[in-house]
Image: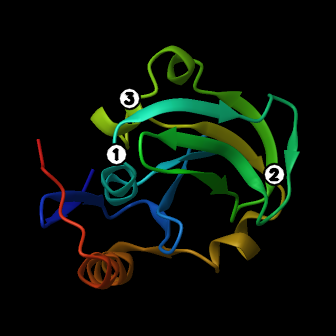
Amino acid sequence: MSERVYKGCKIPLELYYDIENQVWYRLEPDGTVRVGATDIGQTRAGKMVNVRIKAVGKYVQKGKPIASLESGKWTGPVPAIIEGEIVERNEALFDTPELINEDPYGRGWIARLKPANLEKDLRDLLTGEEAFNKLKEYMDREGVECKGS
């Protein structure tokens, strides 16, 4: 996994990013898409205390929430930029929501989707160096710095 770090925040370059909502998407070998919160997003939100994820089998339209996250200082949705059916939820988050903080790109993933229109939806996301540069701009604008691990 190729990764860049800026102000302590990890940014894997192979992922697709929704910059404003701080959500990442990973294309899986089986054609599904794994979804999670970015290191930047989890840092801004603070320690997660509750996670609600839509049920397996539920179809999520573009722009609608896949999940909602709650920390001590923030509650908000994880909107879908890639539309599709939820095929798996990260059940571990129900008992240990702070996995999102500890390992946002690994054990802290949120859900896996079977995309309905992947090629079209990917056009609304950024990846690689373009994503890295936009994430840096976002961090500078919002004053975000990660602690790093």
Q: Position of residue 107 (x, y in %)?
A: 40, 28
**In the displayed structure, would residue 113 be above or below residue 116?**
above
The residue at which mark 2 appears reads as: 84
Cα distance, mark 3 to mark 2? 26 Å
Horizontal side of residue 57 vs 40, given as left or right? right
Q: Within 10 angstroms of label 3, few (less than 14), some, or many (20 or more) residues?
A: many
Q: CA distance from mark 1 to mark 2?
A: 28 Å
Question: What residue is disc 1 on?
Answer: 46
Q: Earlier in the sequence, mark 1 or mark 2?
A: 1
Residue drawn at 75 percent across, 75 percent down: 120
Q: In this rendering, does residue 32 appear at all?
A: no
Nearer-N-terminus badge (3/1): 1
Please say if the residues under marks 3 and 2 sit with CB atoms less than 8 Å apart: no
Image quadrant assignment for residue 46? top left
Query: On screen, 24 above or below 33?
Result: below
Badge 3 or badge 2: first in the primary sequence: 2
Q: Is residue 50 above or below residue 121?
A: above
Residue placed under numbered mark 3 in the picture: 98
Give SS at disc 3: loop
In terms of depth relative to the viewer, which is nearer, 103 or 16? Answer: 103
**Residue 37 at x, y percent in the picture:** 46, 50
